C-alpha cells in the first residue's frame, strides 16, 4: 500500500497544508461510521423479493421481458 | 398538414417540443450549424447556444454530460452523428443511461433521446454505414425507435422527447431528403407498428429504410400474383408483437427483412418469437456478415435488394405452408 492515494493524500495534508492529525482522524472515523451503519442496515434487511428483478427497468415496454 | 422532408420533420418536432418544454436541450457536434444532415437547421438561431450546445468531438463526453443533465432534471437530446460513432459512448449509454433507473430503485431517471443516424449511405464505407439496432434492443432499460417516413420521424421524435426512458433514435441516412405530408396532430405511440400494405399470402416485417425496399418488392410480387402484407415495426423495443402475430395468423408465412447483418440480427428474434407461438413458415433476410465496402460494387453486396426479397418470398411460396424451411 505504499502508493495508496488515501495514505498519500493524508501525508500530503499533514506535511504541506498544516492539517491536524486529530481532524483527519475525525474525518476517517466519520466515514467508517457511515460505512458500518450502511453494512448493518444491509445485513438487517430481508433478501430482495424476486419481483424486484423486474421492477424499475423502464416505463415504456415494462413487462415485456422476452 | 405540410409537405416536409424527413430532416425537416425532425426539426419541426424538436422545435415544437422545445417551445413547449424548456427542459429540452440539445448537445452534439456541428449542431450549431444545423447538423451534418440539416436535421437541426435553424434551431441555434431560434433557441440560442444555451439550448443548442455545440460540443467538442468526444462522443463519450457528450453522452456522459447528457446523462448527468437528465439526472439533474433536464431532457437532453444527444446527437452522435452516426451509429458507428456511438460506439465511443457505449459505456455511458449501456452502463449509465440504461441502468440508472434500476440501480437506484426508480429514483434516478435518464430521459434522454440519443439520435444516431444509421445505415448505408452512398460511399460511406465500413465505419459510417452500420446498422446496429440489435445491439441496443439487447439492453434492458433502453427504448429503440427507427422511423422510416417524415410523419413517423415527426410523431416518434415527439413521443421520444416525452418518454421517461433513454430512447435510441435511429434515423436512416438515406431518408433525410424523403418527403411526405406531416400532420403535427398525429400521435404515434412508441411500440406501435404500422401495416403499410395489406396482403394475404405472406407477411413482410421490416423497419427504417427497408420499408421502402419492401414496398417495392411487394409491388413486384403482386405482378407475380403474390399478395404481400408489409408491416413497418417503427419501434424495435418495445415491438408490436400483436400486430405481427395477427398478420402471420392470416398469412401463415413470415419474412423479416433488415439492412443489418443477418447473423445475430433482430430478424432472428422476431422469427423465433412468432414460430414459438404459431405454426408459421418463417425466414429472415439481412445483409451478409461483411463490412460495408467503399467501392460501389462492394457496397451493393452489403445491401438487401427488392430482387432478393422477391426471390426469398417466391421460395417460401413454393414450400408447404406452416413448415419451417432451411435458410
Image: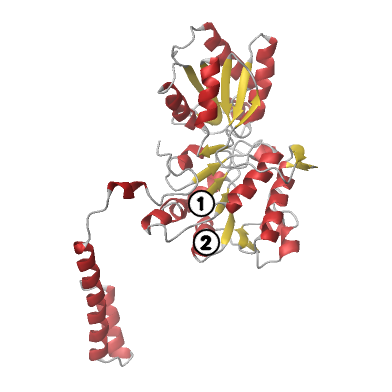
The residue at which mark 1 appears reads as: B166
Q: Is residue B89 left or right of residue A5?
A: right
Secondary structure, mark 1, is loop
Residue located at (51% from left, 66% from top): B72
Residue B188 is at least partly visible in this image: yes
Of the pair B268 and B227, the residue shown nearer to us = B227
Q: Position of residue B164 (x, y in %)?
A: 52, 54
Q: Position of residue B22 (x, y in %)?
A: 65, 64
> From the image, which quarter does the N terminus of chain B lie in?
top right
Chain letter belonging to callout 1:
B
Residue at the far right in the pictured view = B2
Within the image, what quadrant is residue B175 found in? top right
Check residue B286 in the rendering and tell me which mark sits there, or answer none.
none
- Image height of B73 relative to B118, above or below: below
Chain letter belonging to callout 2:
B
Q: Position of residue B69 (x, y in %)?
A: 53, 64
Residues marked 1 and 2, same chain: yes
Q: Colour scheme in the image?
A: secondary structure
Residue located at (77% from left, 42% from top): B4
Of the pair B192 and B88, the residue shown nearer to us = B192
Q: CA distance from mark 1 to mark 2?
A: 9 Å
Secondary structure, mark 2, is helix
- Image height of B273 relative to B251, above or below: below
Within the image, what quadrant is residue A35 found in? bottom left
The residue at which mark 2 appears reads as: B70
Residue located at (56% from left, 63% from top): B74
- Image height of B230 relative to B168, above or below: above
Q: Is the C-beta separation of discs 1 and 2 under 8 Å?
A: yes
Q: Position of residue A11 (x, y in %)?
A: 26, 84
Amino acid at each position: 500500500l505504499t502508493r495508496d492515494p488515501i495514505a498519500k493524500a493524508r501525508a500530503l495534508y499533514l506535511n504541506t497544508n498544516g492539517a491536524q492529525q486529530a481532524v483527519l482522524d475525525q474525518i476517517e472515523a466519520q466515514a467508517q461510521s457511515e460505512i458500518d451503519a450502511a453494512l448493518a442496515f444491509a445485513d438487517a434487511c430481508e433478501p430482495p423479493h424476486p419481483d424486484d428483478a423486474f421492477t424499475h427497468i423502464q416505463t415504456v415496454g415494462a413487462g415485456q421481458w422476452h | 398538414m405540410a409537405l416536409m422532408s424527413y430532416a425537416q420533420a425532425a426539426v419541426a418536432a424538436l422545435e415544437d417540443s422545445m417551445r413547449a418544454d424548456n427542459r429540452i436541450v440539445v448537445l452534439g457536434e456541428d449542431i450549431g450549424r444545423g447538423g451534418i444532415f440539416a436535421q437541426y437547421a435553424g434551431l441555434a438561431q431560434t433557441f440560442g447556444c444555451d439550448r443548442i450546445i455545440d460540443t467538442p468531438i468526444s462522443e463519450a463526453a457528450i453522452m456522459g454530460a447528457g446523462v448527468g443533465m437528465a439526472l439533474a432534471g433536464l431532457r437532453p437530446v444527444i446527437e452522435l452523428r452516426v451509429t458507428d460513432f456511438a460506439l465511443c459512448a457505449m459505456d455511458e449509454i449501456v452502463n449509465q443511461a440504461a441502468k440508472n433507473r434500476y440501480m437506484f430503485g426508480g429514483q434516478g431517471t435518464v430521459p434522454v433521446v440519443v439520435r444516431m443516424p444509421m445505415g448505408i449511405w452512398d460511399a460511406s464505407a465500413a465505419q459510417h454505414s452500420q446498422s446496429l439496432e440489435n445491439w441496443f434492443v439487447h439492453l434492458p432499460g433502453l427504448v429503440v425507435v427507427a422511423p422510416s417516413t417524415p410523419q413517423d420521424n415527426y410523431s416518434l421524435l415527439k413521443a421520444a422527447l416525452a418518454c421517461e426512458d433513454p430512447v435510441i433514435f435511429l434515423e436512416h441516412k438515406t431518408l433525410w431528403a424523403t418527403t411526405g405530408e406531416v400532420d403535427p396532430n398525429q400521435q404515434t405511440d412508441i411500440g406501435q407498428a404500422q401495416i403499410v400494405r395489406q396482403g394475404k399470402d405472406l407477411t413482410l416485417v421490416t423497419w427504417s429504410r427497408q420499408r421502402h425496399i419492401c414496398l417495392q418488392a411487394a409491388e413486384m410480387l403482386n405482378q407475380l400474383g403474390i399478395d404481400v402484407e408489409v408491416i413497418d415495426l417503427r419501434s424495435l423495443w418495445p415491438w408490436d408483437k400483436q400486430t405481427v402475430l395477427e398478420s402471420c395468423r392470416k398469412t401463415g408465412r413470415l419474412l423479416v427483412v433488415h439492412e443489418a447483418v443477418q447473423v445475430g440480427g433482430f430478424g432472428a428474434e422476431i422469427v423465433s418469437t412468432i414460430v414459438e407461438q404459431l405454426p408459421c413458415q418463417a425466414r429472415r433476410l439481412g445483409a451478409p456478415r461483411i463490412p460495408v465496402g467503399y467501392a460501389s460494387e462492394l457496397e451493393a453486396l452489403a445491401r438487401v435488394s427488392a430482387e432478393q426479397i422477391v426471390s426469398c418470398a417466391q421460395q417460401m411460396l413454393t414450400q408447404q405452408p406452416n413448415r419451417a424451411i432451411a435458410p
